[in-house]
Image: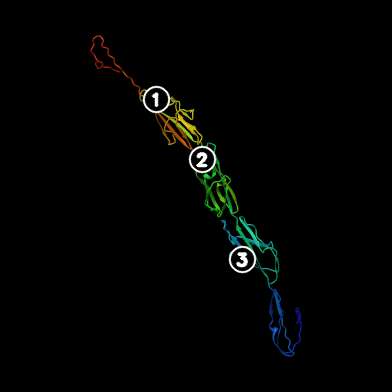
């Protein structure tokens, strides 16, 4: 046994006969033996055995793992990486790149990709010796988009609705927990599991005027957060009071001669009054000699008689018609016959005319 040296090598004297030459294994190097490193040698013969050692190139494997559970669509080949901040390298379609490198320390990074969170496993300052190998795994998880839906209700005209009386629905994308839900003044933060074009609508109560913010429709990308605000204001109810007059027996009163009132406030026939929802209003008129009340017709919310009340809801717009007819006058003619001087005529003997 002896240490190896480069050419011209070490000369060893030995007896003729069979022989072989070998060396101790050395990690990281591949060994190859020349032809004359084994065989037979005769007395006086000289042979040269050459043993060659070639360092084995280290292997660096970079694996890409992509998770698309929030609507992302990127694949492994859509990402690149850099080794020791060198040139960008695209990932293979199968998500694994096998690199032959020199012995040394390596760090693998990748440019950030919008909408994805990156995590690294065994990718920083990885030392690889000759013949060694290492694996760096880079994982990318798509970032969920968030859509916050706020329901705002304004009751300026007696309305009593609250946010939860309205149902909000997100269209064209999917959200955790379902796409339809009760409105909330504080807002509902919905995590989207798909992204792209979307819109938000509402359903629920009538009698409220809706308005919506710009972000209640459009497009949303991975990792984005948008806020959609729906505002609803109660619509003040309206009542139109109409007077119809029947002058079939010589009456001369017009529609505005009856002192119409809504809640004690005088109005003309056909005049529309804006009211407060949920409040009761008395419909009435002044007593008009020679005219009788006939009926109140119109919407089902109109009272049946004078002095009755009407209570409206937000957005109501109704008409109540009060009809009066003139009362036919009556004339009674009485005939009196006095026969105190011998006369004999009776009442029927006197034809009367009007």
Q: Residues within 10 Å of mark 1 (few under 14, many from 20)?
A: some
- Name which of mark 2 and mark 3 comes first in the sequence: 3
Q: Residues within 10 Å of mark 3 (few under 14, many from 20)?
A: some
Considering the image in quadrants, where does the C terminus appear?
top left
The quadrant holding residue 121 is bottom right
- Name which of mark 2 and mark 1 comes first in the sequence: 2
Of circles 1 and 3, the one toward us is 1
Report the residue marked by disc 1. 291
- Name which of mark 1 and mark 3 comes first in the sequence: 3
SS for dot 1:
strand
Q: Position of residue 248 (x, y in %)?
A: 36, 25
Q: Nearer the viewer, residue 229 or 265?
A: 265
Q: Is residue 45 above or below residue 93?
A: below
Q: Position of residue 347 (x, y in %)?
A: 26, 16
Report the residue marked by disc 3. 96
SS for dot 2:
strand
Q: Contact (CB < 8 A) between labels 1 and 3?
A: no
Instruction: Give the mark count.
Output: 3
The circle drawn on residue 98 is none
**How far is mark 2 from mark 1, CA to CA?**
41 Å
**How far is mark 1 from mark 3, CA to CA?**
99 Å
SS for dot 3:
strand
Q: Position of residue 222 (x, y in %)?
A: 59, 54
Q: Contact (CB < 8 A) between labels 2 and 3?
A: no
**How far is mark 2 from mark 3, CA to CA?**
59 Å
Report the residue marked by disc 2. 208
The quadrant holding residue 89 is bottom right
Q: Residues within 10 Å of mark 2 (few under 14, many from 20)?
A: many
User: What residue is rendered at 55% in x and 49% in y?
Assistant: 218
Q: Is residue 325 above or below residue 198?
A: above
Is residue 170 at least partly visible in the picture?
A: no
Q: Position of residue 305 (x, y in %)?
A: 42, 31
């Amino acid at each position: 046994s002896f240490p190896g040296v480069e050419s011209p090598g070490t000369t060893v004297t030995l007896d003729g006969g069979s022989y072989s030459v070998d060396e101790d294994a050395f990690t990281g190097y591949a060994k190859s033996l020349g032809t004359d490193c084994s065989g037979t040698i005769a007395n006086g013969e000289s042979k040269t055995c050459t043993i060659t050692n070639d360092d084995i190139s280290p292997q660096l494997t970079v694996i890409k793992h992509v998770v698309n559970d929030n609507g992302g669509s990127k694949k492994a080949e859509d990402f690149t990486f850099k080794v020791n901040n060198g040139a960008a390298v695209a990932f293979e379609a199968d998500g694994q790149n096998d690199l032959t490198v020199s012995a040394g320390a390596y760090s693998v990074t990748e440019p950030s990709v919008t909408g994805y969170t990156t995590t690294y496993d065994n990718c920083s300052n990885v030392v690889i010796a000759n013949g060694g190998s290492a694996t760096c795994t880079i994982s990318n998880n798509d970032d969920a988009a968030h859509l916050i839906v706020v329901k705002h209700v304004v009751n300026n005209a007696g309305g009593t609705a609250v946010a939860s009386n309205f149902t909000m629905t997100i269209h064209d994308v999917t959200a955790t927990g379902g796409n339809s839900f009760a409105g909330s003044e504080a807002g509902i933060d919905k995590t989207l599991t798909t992204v792209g074009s979307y819109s938000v609508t509402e359903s629920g109560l009538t009698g409220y005027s809706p308005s919506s913010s710009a972000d209640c429709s459009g497009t949303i990308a991975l990792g984005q957060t948008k806020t959609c605000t729906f505002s609803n204001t109660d619509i003040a109810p309206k009542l139109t009071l109409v007077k119809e007059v029947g002058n079939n027996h010589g009456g001369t009163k017009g529609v505005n001669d009856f002192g119409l009132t809504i809640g004690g406030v005088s109005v003309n026939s056909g005049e529309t009054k804006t009211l407060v929802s949920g409040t009761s209003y008395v419909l009435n008129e002044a007593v008009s000699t020679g005219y009788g009340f006939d009926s109140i017709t119109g919407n089902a919310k109109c009272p049946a008689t004078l002095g009755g009340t009407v209570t409206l809801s937000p957005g109501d717009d109704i008409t109540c018609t009060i009809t009066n007819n003139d009362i036919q006058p009556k004339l009674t003619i009485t005939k009196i016959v006095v026969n105190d001087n011998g006369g004999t005529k009776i009442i029927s003997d006197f034809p009367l005319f009007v």
